[in-house]
Every structure is written in structure tokens, then in C-alpha cells.
Amino acid sequence: MSRTPVFFISHGAPTWAIEPGQLGPQIEKLGRELDGVRAVLVVSPHWQTPDLRVMAAAQPETIHDFGGFPDALYRLQYTAPGAPELAQTVAQRLTDAGFPVSIDAQRGRDHGAWVPMMYLLPEARLPVFQVSMPRQLDTRSAYALGRALSSLRDEGVLIVASGSMTHNLYEFRGNPQPAPYVLDFVRWVREAVTARDDASLADYRQLAPQAERAHPTEEHFLPLLVAAGAAAANDVVQPVDGGVTYGILSMDSYVWRPAA
């Protein structure tokens, strides 16, 4: 079985589910190119827990964990099955890596999981489950989490880290023109990711321009470190230019593929 890719997908605002924009068609195309995937594991900032938890529901519900958006969003359902047996395997692997882990047999999929999956695998046939983000996670422990999950790629598990390249909702506005600080931050991140400079990514708070403005809180950036940790040294990085929505949400995404 060939090694699966690793995705970092910027899910932006919940409205991305009904407004494909620049990123949606590209994620759909990447999904059609997938081969040999037997399940998908998603790490999303919208499931934060005191400890590390693994979703083990057989048929996870679609959680509409947002408010004040168009009614059409609340009617959307992503009906892929869960992966209870695989969840047990993942929990054991994380335990072996030194993470305190528990199983959650009730948790459904939050919009950080189901919104990108509606583009990546819209037919919802493959099992899709989640691993939570512990609240105390930082860049280095997020990277370590990715390393602990990386061996799953050789077993047909696709790892999708779902976050947002920029996420300052305090500046949410209708101006479609990208804020200059967003472009500066995104440019720095792209240089670090494509250079495989994971050490600089881990220190982005100190090194990247306007880092605290781009991410007043870190939870939407940390999935990028999970993805970088799950990537192999010889993977080829593919940037996916997602554009900027609402002037402040960069939708840039990345795929790490096994070298040919």
C-alpha cells in the first residue's frame, strides 16, 4: 500500500461550505486524484479538549457549531461513517507515543472537519473520524502529535489538518481587498513550508511578520504544525493558493506528497 498524502486545508468561515471560492474547486480536484485511501483522520481546532481524544462513533453526527449564518448551512449533512476499530488503533499508537488519550464514542464531526471533507470527498463513502486538539497544545507538541500519527499514512489513512492560514475574526469585514499584513504573513509561511523549515514554523510567533495579528489565538495555526509533523522528509510540498476571503482570511492550503 502506497503512502497517503498529508493535507493542511484552510476552512476559513463556515460559509465556505456554500461559497467554494478559489479553493473549493482545487480541493475537489485533489480529492479526485486520491488513491489507496481507506479512512480519513481529521485534526480540527473546533474540537479542543483537556486531554487528547479520539472519535470512535460509528456514525458521527454533523455538528453545526456556529451561529448567525445562512439557513442553508444548517441543512447540510456529511454522512460518512466513523471508524471505531481504527480509532482504537490510533488511541493505542498515541498512548505509545506518550500522549494521555481517551476514546469518545459520542462526539460528532465539527465544521472544521465536515466542511473541507464536502470538497475533498463529497460522496462521503470513506470513514472519517477525528483526533481532538488538547487545549495546552503548542507548536512543538502539535508537531509531535503529527509525528505520532505519521505512520498511519503507510496504512491507508489520509491525515487532514484543518485550520486557517490567517484567523483574526476581530477584523472581519466586507472589504474584499486582502489586508497587507495578511499577505505578508502568508508569504512568510509559504517560504518556510516550501523550504521544509519546520523549526521556523514552530517559532512563527517570534519570526513571522504580524504573527499575533494574523492569529490572536493559535488554535487555527497549530494544525499546520500537525501536518508538518506528519510529513516525511522526502515528501514533496504542493502549495494550494486559496486566495483571501473577507479581506482577512487567507485560504492558502498545502499538500505533502510522497516523492515519485
Image: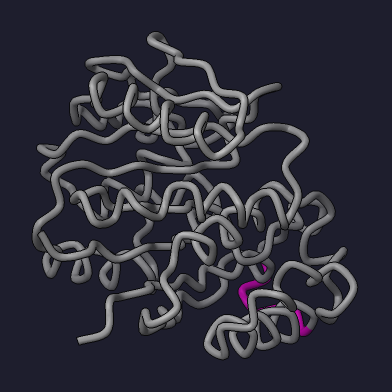
Query: Residue at the location (23% across, 17% down)?
Result: 59
State the image coordinates of residue 16 (x, y, percent, origin top left).
43, 53
Quadrant containing the C terminus is bottom left
* Horizontal side of residue 250 vs 24, given as left or right: right
Q: Which residues are magenta?
A: 175-180
Residue farthest along the front direction in this orientation: 96
* Horizontal side of residue 136 vs 121, given as left or right: right
State the image coordinates of residue 200 (x, y, percent, origin top left).
74, 78
Q: Is residue 249 above or below residue 191?
A: above
In the image, 244 versus 9, the foreground residue is 9
In the image, 81 versus 176, the foreground residue is 81
Quadrant containing the N terminus is bottom left
Query: Residue at the location (31% across, 48% down)?
Result: 152
- The number of numbered badges drawn on the structure is 0
Q: Is residue 17 above or below residue 234?
A: above
- Look at the image and say whether residue 174 sits in the magenta stretch: no
Query: Residue at the location (37% across, 44% down)?
Result: 115
State the image coordinates of residue 9 (x, y, percent, origin top left).
44, 60
Quarter of the view holding residue 48: top right
- Look at the image and say whether residue 177 sits in the magenta stretch: yes
Q: Is residue 121 above or below residue 85?
A: below
Quarter of the view holding residue 193: bottom right
Query: Residue at the location (57% across, 62% down)?
Result: 224
Q: Is residue 111 above or below residue 241?
A: above
Judging from the image, the colouring scheme is one colour
Q: Main secondary structure of the magenta part?
A: loop
State the image coordinates of residue 183 (x, y, percent, origin top left).
69, 84
